[in-house]
Every structure is written in C-alpha cells, then in structure tokens.
Amino acid sequence: MRPANQVLANNRNQEEFPPLLEQSAREVFQIMLGCELDPPTEVPSPESFEFTAMVGLAGELCGVITFRCSAQSAMLITSKMLGGDSKYPDEQVWDAVGELCNVIAGTFKNKLTRISERCMLSVPTVITGANYSYHSLADSGCVEVLFTFSESVVSVSLEVHS
C-alpha cells in the first residue's frame, strides 16, 4: 500500500489541485481585499515577481504553496489589508504578503476534505527581490495558476513531495 501523500500527489495533482488553488486564491482576494482576480493577460517573466511568499505543508500532504507578485501588487495588497496610505514600511508589506499566502494555503488545505485535519501549515516565509533561485525537493511537478490583479500578474503555485 502506498502512503496517502503519494496517492494524492499521483492521482489528484493534475485533476483537483489547479481548480482548488484557483478557487482558494479567488476566495481569499475577494474576502480579504474585496477584489476579483481576472485571467492573466500576459505570461510574466520571472523578474516581474519581486515578492515571493511561501507556506509549507506537512503531514498527509507535504509540499509548499507559493504566492508571487510585483512590488506594486505587494503595496496594493498591504494598502487594501491595512487601509490608508499607499506607502508602508518593508515589515508591513512582508507581513501582508506572507499573511495573504498563509490564508490561501489554509483555504486550499481546508478544501482537501479527506486530509485537512492531518495536514499542518508552516509559518510564512517572504523573499524580496527577483534575482534568486531556489530548489525544491518536490517530486511531482509544480501546479501554478496565474491571475491579473490590478494590471499585474500574480502567481499561486503548489509543489508536492510524495
């Protein structure tokens, strides 16, 4: 018998994960920011993503959910979450983008009805800057959904390790 997370990675990845990621991101943007996400109008270059937030999944499903956006989108997210000005200290922008990713990850996890209680989330990690590379130990590929948020493309992705 294969472990549950291997079955999930092999059987659900292509079919169920992309719509669940998309639905989770749309719900979170609507509830937290009062915004609709539109289909992407362009294919983004890696340099257009200046903020990357990651939340790990551990337990029945192991992997990482990543949210990426431009600096302009990060400021707008912060402004919509905190209200008021459009200029915030770096720490508040990091917190806002990290929290948005955390809520997307939690919403996604809760949609996995058979395993949500046996899957935990890590504390968000936020990376700023576009000139970096990272290497994931995920072995089932990457599921990514792209959206347009206030004229910029944002990305939500999931990498699963079986």
Image (tube, rainbow, N blue to C red):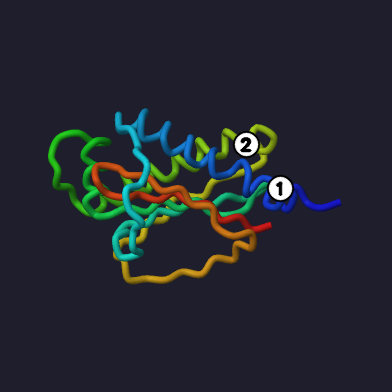
Instruction: From the image, state whether disc 1 or disc 2 is nearer to you.
Output: 1
Point out residue 110 in the picture as x, y percentages from the top left corner: 57, 34
Q: Residue furthest front?
A: 41
Point out residue 148 in the picture as x, y percentages from the top left corner: 32, 44
Q: Name the residue under label 2.
A: 112
Q: Which residue appears at 41% of the width and 48% of the height?
A: 146
Q: How many neighbours does mark 2 have within 10 angstroms: few (below 14), some (14-19), or many (20 or more)? A: some
Q: Which residue appears at 51% of the width and 50% of the height?
A: 122
Q: In which quarter of the image is the C terminus?
A: bottom right
Disc 1 is placed on an element classified as helix
- Residue 92 drawn above or below residue 115: below
Q: Mark 1 points at which residue?
A: 11
Name the image quarter holding residue 54: bottom left
Q: How many neighbours does mark 1 have within 10 angstroms: few (below 14), some (14-19), or many (20 or more)? A: few
Say which label, 1 or 2, has the lower sequence index.
1
* Disc 2 residue type (three-letter): Leu
Asked if the residue under mark 2 is in contact with the one under mark 1, i.e. CB atoms within 8 Å, the reply is: no
